[in-house]
Image (cartoon, rainbow, N blue to C red):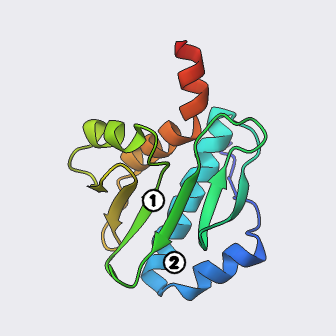
Amino acid sequence: MVKCFAPPDMPAAVQAVFASYPPLAQARLHALRRVVFEEAARLDVGALEETLKWGEPAYLTASSKAGSTIRMAWKEKHPNSCSLFFNCQSDLVLRMSEAFPSEFQYTGNRAVTMPLHGDLPDFAARAIVSMALTYHRDRAAKR
């Protein structure tokens, strides 16, 4: 039997931000949110904290501190895409761009951008989310 996964209820403040986005952006970001929660459960990084950082939905491994914060947003300035943002002091975006050079667009050392149209590259999306959710745990294991 296949177990259905349902992400937890969204906090009201996060829900209000999602609701402020256009429908296509909402759909893409809901899909990414689901990936974040599914990967967190698969990787056993502990409960995620879902909150707002800089007014954008953010996902933190607050209890285990296994990962680096993931933020997601749609920007009116770039209406046909949405982005995942990562700590710019890490090498996450560099590693993501090396692993998936053509699946996404990259902005410096902080953002991974994807179009709102078309299929989400599921394997690549899960891989980059996994990199962030285990960033600190993986670095500690290498020491």
Residue 33 appears in which quarter of the rendering?
bottom right
Disc 1 secondary structure class: strand
Quadrant (top left/top right/bottom left/bottom right) for the C terminus: top right
Question: What's the mark number on residue 26?
Answer: 2
For residue 70, the mark is none
Q: Amino acid at mark 2?
A: Gln
Q: Position of residue 29 (x, y in %)?
A: 51, 68
- Most extreme residue toward the front is 89
Vertical order, 140 against 60 (above or below): above
Determine the residue located farthest toward the left in the rendered image.
102
Residue 125 vs residue 44: left or right? left
Q: Residues within 10 Å of mark 2 (few under 14, many from 20)?
A: some
| Nearer to the camera, 16 or 117 | 16
Q: Is residue 124 above or below residue 20?
A: above
Q: Please give the name of the residue rendered at 74% of the width and 35% of the height, measured from the top-left corner.
A: 64
Relative height, residue 131 to residue 139 (above, below): below
Closer to the camera in the image, 78 or 130: 78
Residue 72 visible, this angle: yes
How far apart marks 1 and 2 lie (CA) works out to 14 Å
Q: In terms of secondary structure, where does tag 2 sit? A: helix
What residue sits 73% from the left and 69% below the top?
10
| Amino acid at dot 1 | Leu
Q: Using the image, tell me which numbered label, if any, was put on residue 84.
A: 1
- In the rendered image, residue 91, in percent from the top left (x then y), is placed at 40, 37
Q: Earlier in the sequence, mark 1 or mark 2?
A: 2
